[in-house]
Image (cartoon, rainbow, N blue to C red):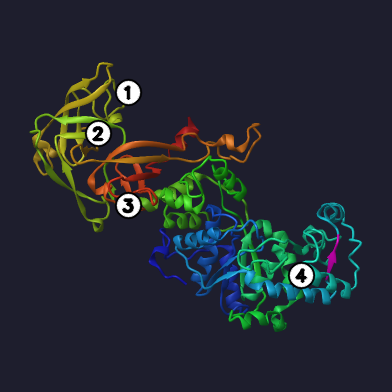
Amino acid sequence: MSTDSAAKPAADATAEPRDFVRQIVRDDLASGRQAAIRTRFPPEPNGYLHIGHAKAICLSFGIAREFGGWCNLRLDDTNPGKENPEFVEGIKEDVRWLGYDWHELRHASDYFEVFYHAAIKLIEDGVAYVDDLDAEQVRAYRGTLTEPGRNSPFRDRSVAENLDLFRRMRAGEFDDGSKTLRAKIDMAAGNINLRDPALYRIRKVTHQNTGDAWPIYPMYDFAHALSDALEGITHSLCTLEFEDHRPLYDWCVDKVDLAHHPELWQSLVDAGLPTTPAKPRQIEFSRLNLSYCITSKRKLAQLVNEGHVDGWDDPRMNTLRGLRRRGFTPAGLRLLIERIGISKQNSVIDYAVLEGCIREDLDATSPRRMAVLDPLKLVVTNLPDDHDETLVFASHPKDESFGTRDVPFSPQLWIEREDFAEVPPKGFKRLIPGGEVRLRGVGIVKCEDVIKDADGHVTELHVTLDPESRHGLPGADRKVKGTIHWVSAKQAVEAEVRLYDRLFSVPAPDDESDGQPWTAHINPEAKRITRGWLEPAAASAAPEQRFQFERIGYFVADRVDHRPGAPVFNRIVTLRDTWAKQAGA
């Protein structure tokens, strides 16, 4: 397991997490039911991971780490045609980015031979049969929540006939969808998952790992349960929608009984794959549901395919790749998971909670820089035109370990246009005609003249600097109401700045009760591009370096497009929650 310090939670790391899953683990260790903890994270490689997966990753890997065990990363590649090696690499990268590493990388396809022999055992034991009903007929026979199902007319085939048919399925004799292997459990079961569920289906599709070796593929419930058992997983952690699948999970593990049938997994031993089968315990927990978010892989793919976003790593996407490019921190995401806790109660977490966790981490970890995104020229007229000065600024106001940086100062500056008002609104504390304001780190200036173009637009401000108010002089303590930031126009570096915000403008974008398709809820203001001016110490950043641009927000150098001489910054989050104000308006 990784012991990288970057994986430590941003919040109180000395507090022992308390939740029902960890309590089960503690009890299992204390009672001797388990001697060591083994978990796994089993994503399907048919898309990139999204923020919902972050909770599962933090829980499975986190519990393994906390209790001195290990966690496997297992790719559930039982659905060829929808899976892609690109997604496999993306999943591995995202898990590591979150601060975790796996004990072993496994694939469900590693076990295809075992699954096949396990299915033959179930047929020989009389608890599995080959069915000729098509998908529509299977649904008709299944019954409803209030009515029992009916037995398939093929349910009572002999063991010999089932073995023959299943082996011929394996040999590729039959067409896709023409036959399935089903478990023989109980068509009257109250739990519909136990009404003779499918274990295998025919799919003549090339698999990215096994090629054309298999014309049949195991169903998820069968493959997942046996994969956990084969790897010796002690605690199989999954989300609440799998609670009704747990009886089938246990049925598969118990009926195959891998621990007492080593002949079924001899192929793994021969291949050098460590195998110590055990009986796993499935535990369900609530998903991470966030307002203003979509976590359906199908809908995320639709956003990409229809061009609503610029790709899977678009900073507006809540894929882990998108959040990373946006500048969200792994520590901030882990802090969110820690804050919301683990429960069995489904709920929707306000997106502002996530943003608050990101801000909290960024406030502690981001050096400060100055940038101006909507520039207005300000000229200090009582300094010579060729005046050049280097000021020393702290890189973090609360942490001296960040050190200092040099900031060039000259008489020609850029300030934010909104920091000047010719006709100030009530409560305005920044620069006005004839008024004074403190230039951050410089001193107090007074607005003497307002220059306008032919259309009456303000193009330049002329100010005088009170020399007695410079840093270190007695007049520096003179009180003025406002302080504004600036960059020296002579040394400032122009940059592309992408102002990102929430992708959806409504808390429940999936809700189409307003008669609009869910894509109509996309926030048109979620991406705005502007040109800004940066102090040199910001422009020289490395890709993925994060800063607080003072008085503006938190920003990151784009990991793809940012380069020396052509800086590109993405806004991570604003300094404060602007959505709460909108909601209360």
Question: Judging from the image, what secondary structure is the residue with disc 3 in?
Answer: loop
Q: Earlier in the sequence, mark 4 or mark 2?
A: 4
- Foreground residue among 417 and 273: 273
Question: Judging from the image, what secondary structure is the residue with disc 2 in?
Answer: strand
Closer to the observer: label 2 or label 1?
2
Point out the stretch of residues depicted in magenta: 128-132
- Residue 194 percent location from the top left of the image: 79, 62
**Residue at position x 61%, y 56% in the image:** 286
Classify 10 Å Cα crowding around label 2: few (below 14), some (14-19), many (20 and above).
Answer: many
Instruction: Estimate the spatial distance between the alpha carbons at disc 2 and disc 1, rounded to whole Å.
Output: 19 Å
**Residue at position x 54%, y 58% in the image:** 87
Q: Earlier in the sequence, mark 1 or mark 4?
A: 4
Question: Judging from the image, what secondary structure is the residue with disc 1 in?
Answer: loop
- Residue 211 percent location from the top left of the image: 64, 66
Instruction: Estimate the spatial distance between the alpha carbons at disc 3 and disc 1, rounded to whole Å.
Output: 33 Å
Q: Which residue is mark 2?
A: 415
Q: Which residue is mark 4?
A: 170
Q: Which residue is mark 3?
A: 366
Q: Could you say which quadrant of the image residue 257 lies in? A: bottom right
Q: Does residue 454 sit above or below 431 in this rendering?
A: above
